[in-house]
Amino acid sequence: MKSISLDIKGIKPYVSKEEQEIMEEKVYEAHDMLENKSGLGKNMLGWLSLPENRDEEEIERIKKAADRIKKQADVFIVVGIGGSYLGAKSIIDLLSNSFSNMETLSDRKHPQIIFAGNNMSAKYTKDLIEYIKDKDVAINVISKSGTTLEPAMSFRILRMFLEEKYGISGAAQRIYVTTDKDKGVLHDIAKKNEYEMFVIDDNIGGRYSVLTPVGLLPMAVANIDIEDILDGALFASHVFNQRSIEGNDCYKYALIRNILYQKGKSIEILASYEPSFRYFIEWYKQLFGESEGKDNKGIFPAGVNFTTDLHSMGQFIQSGSRNIFETVINIEIDRTFIKFPETKDDEDKLNYLAGKEIDYINKQAFLGTLDAHISGGVPVMVINMEDLTEYNIGQLIFFFEKACAISGYILGVNPFDQPGVEAYKKNMMNLLNNG
Ligand code: PA5
């Protein structure tokens, strides 16, 4: 069942029908490049058929590993950076209690999930080791290349911690590795030490890997139904493959964002009214930032959490530089059904809200902001999502991945490489090797 749809009423004052028609052919060319595997980065299209080519045996192995981890650990540490953690983190946040990591193990029903290897902070490292010292720990180290410095450093430290605590063979039972199937330092370490290993296929880049074991193992540990996620993605892979603009909201979104870019709107702000979307927005930023930001081109992907950020970024969005457009993810149905309470004395003068669903109040903030931003010079698209379920999140993930690939091709870049990431690494290595 389709539960993701795009509302483009908020771009009507800014983009004409004719402008859309002129650009349509570019979308079809991009679609054909993906279908015929004839575009830039054509060897990196494995993510497209992932939902279709689901490996049932691997899913079973992931679920078994997750069950083992749940028995072994109070704390499960996911070690990875960029595409090797943002997808899992975002989906776990979306589907968990907002205070999940503070709940007790018996309330949460799975280990506390912590992310590491995504920074080089000495403080973070010290605090982490301090925090886990008396806890039972299992780790999943995720690195496609197997050589990225942040997770590699974190893995060395955590592996030493585990070996000291459980002995070499005890530690080996608690280390799960997700990496390339036959190369890289991490691959070699995993093989030599007989760690349980999961594979990222060669034809899937890090930021497109959330539906591989990279994302699926951590999600399964968090008791997320990974099959529902994949079912949603599978459905989306059909719906968002139509060679049509009218019938394909994913292509429409890619089309509109490129028209807006050509009209000087070079920043896209992804907004949500749910705090749990914070890391989804980070995932989106990486996906589009690394895919499109090259050859001196690209829409700068930014993000905000409303209403929180209406009190920090709202001013700028409303009347700062007019080079931005906004895309809002709107969850249509909220299933919490919490009503705002009434008080007898109405001391705080809020009884005018009494009896209203809190989500209804949040929605009025959304609608009011939508109108204000559109009339303030910000084109706004709305991605409506029926409700927050595994199935719908699977659809949303695929929607953005496909839109990103189409959008990158329209822009004329290779959406599947990231040559710019190497520049800082080279300088840092020079400094580290000569310091
Ligand atoms: O999208 C990408 O390829 C990158 O952002 C990677 O995910 C990130 O750099 C981590 O790389 P690796 O998994 O090789 O450690």
Image (spheres, helix red, strand yellow):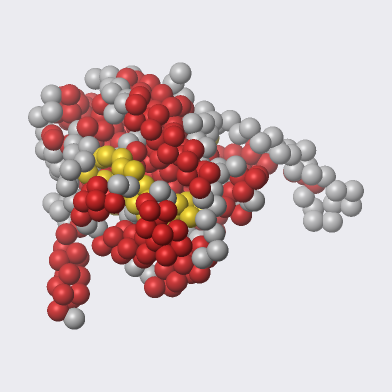
Q: Please state the horizontal and vertical placement of residue 342, each as a whole percent of the image.
A: 82, 45
In this rendering, the answer to whether 316 lies above or below 68 is: below
Residue sitting nearer the eye, 82 or 290 = 82
Image point 17% across, 47% down: which residue?
Answer: 183
User: For the point 39% across and 73% down, which residue is it?
Assistant: 122
Residue 117 in percent (x, y) is at 36, 59
Above or below, 39 against 429 in this view is above
Taking the image as drawn, is residue 58 in sight?
yes
Q: In this orientation, which residue lies closer to the viewer: 241 or 245?
A: 241
How many numbered discs, if any?
A: 0
In the depicted view, which residue is nearer to us: 338 or 233?
A: 233
Asked if residue 35 is positioned above or below residue 162 in the image, the reply reads above
In the rendered image, which quarter is residue 110 located in?
Answer: top right
Instruction: Tell me where residue 411 sits by quadrant.
Output: top left
Residue 175 falls left or right of residue 361: left
**What x and y, as percent, mark residue 304?**
45, 52
Residue beneath the point at 32% across and 36% down:
212
Query: In which quadrant will I find the C terminus?
Result: bottom left
Q: Is residue 119 visible?
A: no
Q: Does residue 311 appear left or right of residue 262 in this picture? A: right
Which one is in front, 431 or 322?
431
Looking at the image, the residue that sits furthest to the right is: 344
Q: Is residue 219 left or right of residue 204?
A: right
Q: Residue at x 65, y 45 (%)?
A: 106
**Whether residue 309 is situated above or below residue 33 in the rendered picture:** below
Residue 164 at x, y percent in the picture: 42, 65
